[in-house]
Image (cartoon, rainbow, N blue to C red):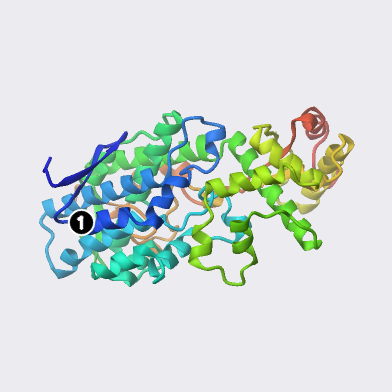
Amino acid sequence: MAKTEKIFRDPLYNYVAIDRDRDKWLLDLIDTPEVQRLRRIHQLGVSHVTYPGADHSRLSHTLGVLHLMQQAWHRIEAVGWKGPEIRRAREVLLAAALLHDLGHGPFSHLYEPVLGINHERWSCQIIQSPETEVRQKLDEHDMPIEHITALIEKDNRQRPPWQKTLLSSELDVDRLDYLRRDSYFTGSGYGHYDWYRIINSFSLDTMEGKPVLVWPDKAKYAIEEYIFARFYMYNNVYQHKTTRGFEKILHAAWERAKRIRDDGKDAWLVHEIADFVEAEQPSVKQYLAMEDATLVYQLQVWTRHPDEVLSDLATRFLAREGLAAIEDPVSEKDIADARDKWEEALQGVVSKQGFDRPECYALRDDLKLTLYNPYSPEKEEQEQDPYNAIFIQPTTGGSPREISKLLERLAPVTGVRERQYRYYVPKECRDAAMSLAASRKWSPAA
């Protein structure tokens, strides 16, 4: 280990090292307020209410992604890739790895739908804003802002495919870190796979005249492990019914506060949140003022609100009085009448238990499995590319092949999956709700 290296201790990699001479600009970026703010954003939203150890921050994940991008670059240097495009790419890739999550709001993904937040878009705005220290440091080091943001924006394909693959694809350093990190801190044990082989075995090939990343046949089982790790983590950790129940409480509290404001009453919004939601076009400064602690304080304020529903929802979250999960009893999911009948009956049960606003307590959770497939390549072979598929170089030679064509065991966890729902009610209503769910077949004929 060189004496010039700045060392960050990390439970996954032991050391995350940055060369003070070669990469002082990275240390300058890490010290900016915008990056340091990530210390105050939970990596896993509210999963710590389910897994007490899941208190790791977005900053720890960010440093892990940076480390893996450094490892990927060592691979690039080791195989002797040359050319001006590759030489210029190093700093852009490292900067994008470090800055890709700047735009996360309170509890990471949790409040994106209710606040209309897209964290990737906000990451780019923070990088582009002349008001941020991040932008100032990038300008000082003459970094190409548009190249960095092109790597972060999900559907932006302006950068070469091999660069985009490293940061944002079906197999990238972001996923390689968060699966192992989230598994470690939750103690779940589902995120194990041979990450070292994956990061140290890829090579460069050409598709349609463009350089792309491919993996050798000997790496296919490590990649298969990775895909199944994603499957297990999403089903057992990211969509854990207890965690999702607390997320639904927060969403319901926010919707209730919004209704109070729409009725012309005071929702007691704390200054930072009020500033953001009341701005026609919120500024970067207004956005960055919202952190996990902001939302927790907002909930503490709401526990004293005169609206009994808002006060109760906030209290339930802070006191960890979660909701009871009710599995979806509707057998014919494609028939709207059946679902409408079930949801109306469920609200009736909640109302009979003394909850005057059953729409705030009988909550449907769309698990959005179509968005959380562990691996979802394009179905049509001609539409598959490095952005949406993982390619293996066969030992027999020839063109690289999409991995699920080589490993049939991946078929059950690839492609579009059926939409699924779960319902939540206060625990006081659990027995009555479960009896209702079991009482009859929920179909239009019932």
Query: How far from the left and from the top, in percent, is residue 436?
Result: 82, 33
75 vs 125: above or below: above
Residue at mark 1? 24
Q: In this picture, is 426 found above or below 94?
A: above
Residue 328: x, y in percent?
70, 39
Q: Do we see residue 101 in this rendering?
A: yes
Instruction: Give above or below for 274 relative to 279.
Output: above
The quadrant holding residue 401 is bottom left
Position in image of residue 196 (x %, y %): 24, 40
Q: Which residue occupies 11% across, 63% down?
A: 82
Q: Is residue 123 left or right of residue 29?
A: right
- Tell me the quarter of the image containing the C terminus: top right
Residue for point 54% across, 46% down: 293
Q: Which residue corresponds to the image point at 76% horizontal and 46% vertical from the top-left?
A: 305
Q: Quadrant of residue 347?
A: top right
**In the picture provided, is 430 more to the left or to the right than 13?**
right
State whether residue 167 appears in this view: no
Element at label 1: helix
Question: In x, y percent, where is residue 116?
Answer: 59, 61
Amino acid of disc 1: Lys
- From the viewer's perspective, is residue 433 above or below residue 393? above
Task: Assign the N terminus to one quadrant of the image.
Answer: top left
The residue depicted at 44 percent of the width and 28 percent of the height is 187
